[in-house]
Image (cartoon, rainbow, N blue to C red):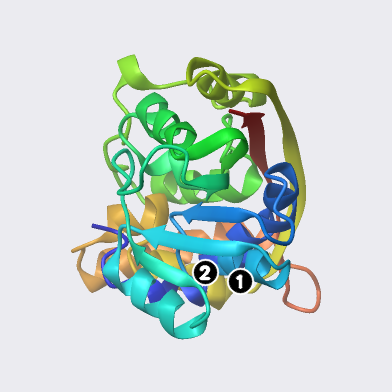
Amino acid sequence: MQWTDAAAAFAGSYAHLCGYTAPALLDAAGATAGVRLLDVGTGTGTVAALAAGRGTRVTAVDAEPSMVEFTRSRLPAVTVGAGRLPDLDFPDGSFDAVVANFVVNHVADPARAVAELARVSAPGGRVAFTVWPRPAPPLQQLWLDVLDAADLEPAPPTVPDELNFPRTAAGAAGLLDRAGLRDVGGRVLTWEHRTDLDTWWSGAASGMGALGEALAGRDARTVAAARREYERLAGRYVTADGTLTLPTAALLVHGVR
């Protein structure tokens, strides 16, 4: 599993990318002081930390034990525990706001997962989540191009075709409609992720993401060949000072129970 014991590696690579959407996600969920908020798939706690700074009453859950321990040690004032979609161990209507930052794109049954987010939100509460769009923006397409250039097979898709949804703002919002939410809306967030070649490679080298999954268990020669293709293809995004600047985008959708 790509996320097993991956908290430290995630914190040093992909967490910064995923954290970009946190302010807009919390705004969409109405996360203000006193609000009871559930952060599902908290990872290393970026959203939970920002929410706590706003004065919300934060509960954070994640399916991966290393993420739970990392976030618990980082945010001792936040209630952090184990939790996995689509079966959250909370009564109906437990929270005023429920958020999931880049979690729905990792579940096998997105509609059921979003219905669970809605279930644990109180009447009048807000649900908001983010997913990556398709077609893939340049940042995500880079990994796909490296897979192709290195002649590596991507991992099988997480979601069966019959359970999938269009990775567009309308498609993601449709999951909230199906879950019975009202005042549903969505938009595309765009930005440039700034990092460097070594840091960005470290996520894949640790087994995360599409390339990381394909490299898992491969011999050193195969990994080195993939690294060379990565540096070649990523070169077009490296500025004179060595900064790797990757355009990307996310879908943010929200609704009211």
Q: Which residue in the protein does label 1 denote?
A: 49
Q: Residues within 10 Å of mark 2 (few under 14, many from 20)?
A: many
Q: For the point 45% across and 64% down, which residue is it? A: 43
Instruction: Indicate the amino acid at tag 2.
Output: Gly
- Quadrant into which the C terminus falls: top right
Q: Position of residue 200 (x, y in %)?
A: 54, 69
Task: Tell me if I can see residue 231 in this picture.
Answer: no
Q: For the point 35% across and 66% down, which residue is it? A: 81
Q: Residue 159 versus residue 117: which sits nearer the camera? A: 117
Q: Is residue 38 above or below residue 221?
A: above
Quadrant housing residue 120:
top left
Task: Tell me if I can see residue 252 in this picture.
Answer: yes
Q: Residue 216 versus residue 126: which sits nearer the camera? A: 126
Q: Is residue 73 above or below residue 199?
A: below
- Quadrant into which the N terminus falls: bottom left
Q: Residues within 10 Å of mark 1 (few under 14, many from 20)?
A: many
- Badge 2 marks a residue whose secondary structure is loop
How many numbered marks does the figure carry? Answer: 2
Instruction: Indicate the amino acid at tag 1.
Output: Ala
Residue farthest right in this picture: 240
Quadrant housing residue 239:
bottom right
Tell whether label 2 touches label 1 (CB within 8 Å).
Answer: yes
Q: Position of residue 30 (x, y in %)?
A: 72, 46
Quadrant housing residue 250:
top right
Q: Which mark is residue 45?
A: 2
Q: Residue 65 versus residue 243: which sits nearer the camera? A: 65
Decide if residue 80 is on the left or right side of residue 172.
left
Q: Residue 104 versus residue 235: which sits nearer the camera? A: 104
Give the alpha-carbon distance from disc 1 to disc 2, as whole Å: 6 Å
Q: Position of residue 163 (x, y in %)?
A: 34, 20
- Badge 1 marks a residue whose secondary structure is helix
